[in-house]
């Protein structure tokens, strides 16, 4: 728990949550009375003051981002761009396409030849939770492949294939059309999709990440980026706060 600070410090909780887009001030007061809001792990009180830069506020168990200095970008990474903050070989990086300040970092990676959605932020806590195995945050990919994409290959991807760094299994694997694999993973090992495909006799010719947890954006052009909306952040926070049993069965539908 953070230092409570001097009595009366901070801003009123209902004002802060209304500014964060959670609900109107009146509705926030009702949610406090219903016990749906907690501050630093304790039930919120009517008229309570909070400090956005220090206090942790949860609504229905999901942390609400209150700090004004945090940014969250969604980028549609094109092929040929590396997912690092800098590159010793001088190749273009994902940060070349974003504002120089504040400094952000990729949450996970896509290899140079892969495309699709990448989350970048200066919110270290959110980044940690997206990547931590316990949250089972799903990443969905559409993969163009060469080779026989048989029912047996799909079954092997779902039950698990042996890689050099251990068994790897997809949460879901299907073939929406000939030569195309749709695969969902909750891990983020290096070149995992490509290696899993190779293990069942498939060669990847194109790989596109289409979803991160509940985040999608079919309208974002290759190389394009935008900030996440407050609604998307709330949905993502709720998704990451879900119990692991629910996480294993959920699908993302935000920002279609």
Image: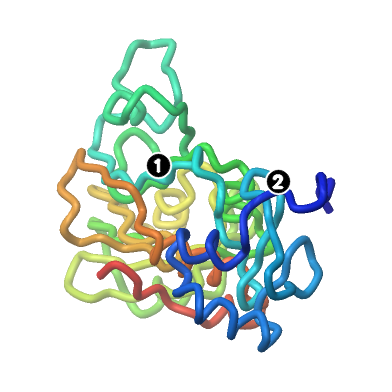
Mark 1 secondary-structure assignment: loop
Q: Which labelled disc corresponds to residue 154?
A: none
User: Residue placed at 44% from the left, 28% from the top?
Assistant: 102
Front residue of 201 and 88? 88
Mark 2 secondary-structure assignment: loop
Mark closest to the chain's N terminus, 2 or 1: 2
What is the basis of the colouring in this image? rainbow
Q: Tell me the residue that label 1 is attached to.
A: 110
Q: Tell me the residue that label 2 is attached to.
A: 54
Q: Is residue 35 left or right of residue 200?
A: right
User: Residue placed at 46% from the left, 44% from the top?
Assistant: 191
Q: Is residue 207 left or right of residue 242?
A: left
Q: Is residue 160 left or right of residue 9?
A: left
- Percent across and percent down for residue 152 are 40, 77
- Percent across and percent down for residue 184 are 43, 67
- Percent across and percent down for residue 23 are 46, 74
Q: In which quarter of the image is residue 32?
A: bottom right
Mark yes or no: residue 193 visible.
yes
User: Residue placed at 20% from the left, 42% from the top?
Assistant: 224
């Amino acid at each position: 728990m953070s230092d409570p600070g001097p009595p009366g410090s901070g801003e009123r909780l209902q004002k802060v949550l209304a500014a964060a887009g959670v609900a109107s001030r009146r509705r926030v007061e009702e949610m406090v009375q219903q016990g749906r809001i907690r501050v630093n792990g304790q039930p919120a009180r009517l008229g309570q003051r909070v400090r956005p830069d220090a206090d942790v506020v949860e609504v229905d168990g999901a942390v609400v981002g209150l700090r004004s200095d945090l940014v969250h970008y969604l980028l549609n990474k094109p092929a040929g761009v590396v997912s690092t903050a800098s590159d010793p070989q001088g190749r273009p990086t994902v940060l070349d396409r974003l504002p120089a300040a504040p400094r952000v970092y990729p949450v996970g990676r896509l290899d140079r030849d892969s495309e699709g959605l990448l989350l970048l932020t200066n919110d270290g806590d959110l980044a940690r939770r997206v990547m931590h195995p316990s949250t089972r945050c799903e990443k969905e990919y559409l993969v163009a492949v060469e080779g026989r994409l048989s029912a047996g290959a799909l079954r092997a991807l779902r039950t698990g294939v042996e890689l050099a760094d251990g068994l790897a299994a997809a949460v879901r694997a299907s073939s929406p059309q000939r030569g195309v694999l749709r695969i969902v993973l909750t891990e983020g090992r290096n070149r995992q999709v490509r290696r899993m495909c190779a293990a069942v006799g498939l060669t990847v010719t194109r790989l596109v990440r289409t979803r991160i947890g509940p985040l999608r954006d079919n309208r974002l052009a290759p190389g394009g980026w935008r900030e996440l909306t407050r609604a998307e952040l709330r949905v993502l926070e709720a998704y990451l706060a879900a119990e692991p049993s629910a996480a294993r069965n959920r699908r993302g539908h935000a920002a279609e």
